[in-house]
Image (cartoon, helix red, strand yellow):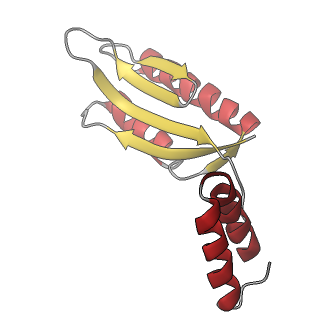
Amino acid sequence: MMQFVESVTLYSIGTSKARIIQAAASQFEHTLLEESTLLALVKNLNMLVEICNRSYRGNSLEFHHTPGQISIRYPANGSEKVVVSISYAPVLCHITNNCQIREEIQRRLEREFPEDCARYLIDYTREGGCL
């Protein structure tokens, strides 16, 4: 299954660790990833967090991954300091041609709004669309 990285949010944290993590993560916004490459992203970001924690002084970064969300942050001590947050979701449909758009709209309208579906199809064919 393909995953779509919807957003990579970078928070204003001025540490060397944060800048490295943000530079690595920011390039994946609006990217399609196979399931295996998503797992590779998780693994590589986690590894980078470990490298930063070993290489730089200061509070250790924490890596968190739950379905749909990857976050890297400093430990919570009253107010959590998030460095980066990555939101992703499964790609539900991959549309490659114009007819698929009509099919998807028609399929939804047939279930929920049959009269509007009929009007839509009449106008669609009147405009030169093929069924």
Query: Farthest residue in the front direction?
Result: 115
Q: Report the quarter where the C terminus lies.
A: bottom right
Residue depicted at x 54% and y 47%: 28
Quarter the N terminus occupies: top right
> In x, y percent, where is residue 127?
65, 90
Residue 14 in the image: above or below residue 125: above
Picture quadrant where residue 43 is located: top right
- The residue lying toward the viewer, choosing from 6 and 93, is 93
**65 shown above or below 9:** above
Which residue is found at the position 61% from the left and 65% from the top? 115
Q: Nearer the viewer, residue 6 or 48?
A: 6
Q: In the picture shown, does residue 59 fall above or below 30?
A: above
Residue 7: percent from the left, percent from the top?
A: 45, 45
The residue positioned farthest toward the left in the image shown: 78
108 shown above or below 97:
above
Picture coordinates of residue 12 (x, y %)? Answer: 24, 37
The image quadrant that residue 18 belongs to is top left
Residue displayed at 50% across by 49% down: 29
In front here: 54 or 114?
Answer: 114
Question: Would you say residue 21 is visible in this rendering?
Answer: no
Q: Is residue 116 left or right of residue 92?
A: left
What residue do we see at 62% from left, 34% from top? 41
State how many labels appear: 0
Most foreground residue, 34 or 93: 93
Q: Which residue extends farthest top?
A: 77
Asked where in the image residue 109 lies, by quadrant, the reply is bottom right
Task: Judge whether residue 32 can be spotted in this image.
Answer: yes
